[in-house]
Amino acid sequence: MTDLSGVRECLGAWLAAFNAKDIESLMSLYDPESSYAGARTPLMRGIDEIRACYERSFPQVTGTLMFKEEAVFEQESMALIYGSFYFKPDADVDEPGTTGRVAIVYRRAGDGSWKLLFDMDNSAPDVTPKDFM
């Protein structure tokens, strides 16, 4: 039996927490063994390293992060969702924003909830802001 709605809900909660710059809500969505491999950052392992990265970067983050699902798979206690993202700039900013692709692995926790285990993003040449209009 698949529970793809739970994975999608977890990603939706992550986007809401990220866009609100709510570090506590954001970190509550991570598995204790999480890793993050960002396109412009060194590999981070564990919630403490990931938290520190967001605490440093949130003061400079503007705009809204958007996501478009391309595929999602679930097998027992693991799930993978991938898609394209767009960092839509604020209306008063005259720049196109940042786009790319992201793959996120979730692991089901003991209480049945999904937790973000691995996140990798890149700058994909075939993803543009027009894809989100």
Image (spheres, rainbow, N blue to C red):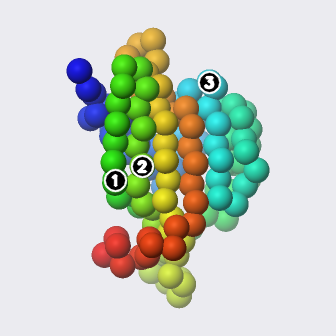
Q: Inspect this view and state whether residue 104 appears.
A: yes
Cα distance, mark 2 to mark 1? 6 Å
Label 2 sits on residue: 82
Residue that extends furthest to the top in the rendered view of this protein:
110
- The image position of residue 7, as x and y in percent, is 36, 35
* Disc number lying in front (2 or 3): 2
Query: Which residue corresponds to the image point at 57% horizontal and 54% vertical from the top-left?
Result: 121
Residue type at the position of mark 3 = Pro
Q: What residue type is labelled 1?
A: Glu
Q: Position of residue 55 (x, y in %)?
A: 70, 48
Instruction: From the image, tell me which residue sits under label 1.
Output: 69
Q: In this view, does 5 lie above or below 43?
A: above
Disc 1 residue crowd, few under 14, some 14–19, many 20+, Cα 10 Å? some
**Where is the C terminus found, in terms of image quarters?**
bottom left
Q: Residue at x 42, y 60 (%)?
A: 84
Label 2: element kind:
strand
Give me the residue at 42% from left, 76% from top. Answer: 129
Up-down relation of residue 101 to residue 5 (above or below): below
Disc 3 target residue: 32
Q: Is residue 84 above or below residue 94?
A: above
